Amino acid sequence: MKPIPLKYRILPLITATFIGVWYYRNKKDGTTAFLIFGVMYFVSYFIISAAWRDAQTTPLGEGKRIAGVDDGCPAPTIDVALNLKNRQKAIDEFGYGPPNPALPNREFWERKKKMWKVNDDAEVKSMRCGNCAAFDISAKAKACIGQGIGGQDPEQVIDAGELGYCRFLKFKCAAKRTCDAWVTGGPIK
């Protein structure tokens, strides 16, 4: 993991100094101002360092690229392990599914109806990745997915699975599935 850049290490110091000086000027209590400075510095530093650490280890692969592959391809389209990690996160945290869209999946769709506060099965079942505003089926996205699949005819797999790239959750997803992050207005062509 990269070290925290200097500008982010100085920010807690500036914040704590500002608050400490303000308190001292208004309350004329040097001991309390010093304690406030110390607490604010450490709290700010830990918040910034935690955010930096999370940004460096995020599983979503945003901004990450694979060496030797087209620089315009998101890492999850090429890296199967990263894609599966992101897809599992989509299943666990965003209700991605159903597992097999060809089956009725009554329980899955009942949960979606309850979440969206919709009574009509047809309405909730129309909210699929294939018509989501984050579902990218552009030629570039399909080319990236094809690079990740490899082989002689990746288009056959892409077409059979109706695959696209989810720009929200950063993984290859199937048009017949859905998730809690669905937004009307797609797909991206």
Image (cartoon, helix red, strand yellow):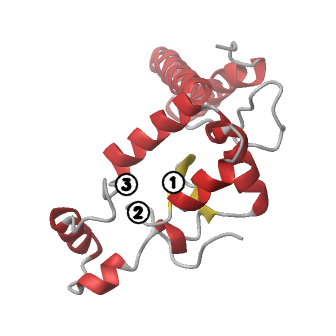
Disc with the residue nearer the chain's start (1 vs 3)? 3
Mark number, residue 173: 1
The residue positioned 56% from the left and 32% from the top of the image is 80
Mark 2 = which residue?
A: 177
| Inter-mark Cα distance, 1 to 3 | 9 Å
Q: Which mark is residue 42?
A: none
Decide: marks 2, 3 in contact (CB < 8 A)? yes
Looking at this view, is 82 or 93 the one in front? Answer: 82
Residue drawn where x is 64% and y is 40% of the image: 149
Which residue is painted at 60% across and 34% down in the image? 22
Circle 1: is it few (<14), some (14-19), or many (20+) Cα within 10 Å? many
Q: Is residue 34 above or below residue 144?
A: above
Question: Disc 1, disc 3: CB below 8 Å?
Answer: yes
Mark pair 2, 1: CA separation: 8 Å
Residue drawn at (72%, 41%), measured in percent from left and top?
Answer: 152
Q: Secondary structure at mark 1?
A: strand
Q: Answer whether labels 2 and 1 touch (C-beta < 8 Å).
A: yes
Q: Position of residue 30 (x, y in %)?
A: 52, 17
Pick the front one: 172 or 186:
172
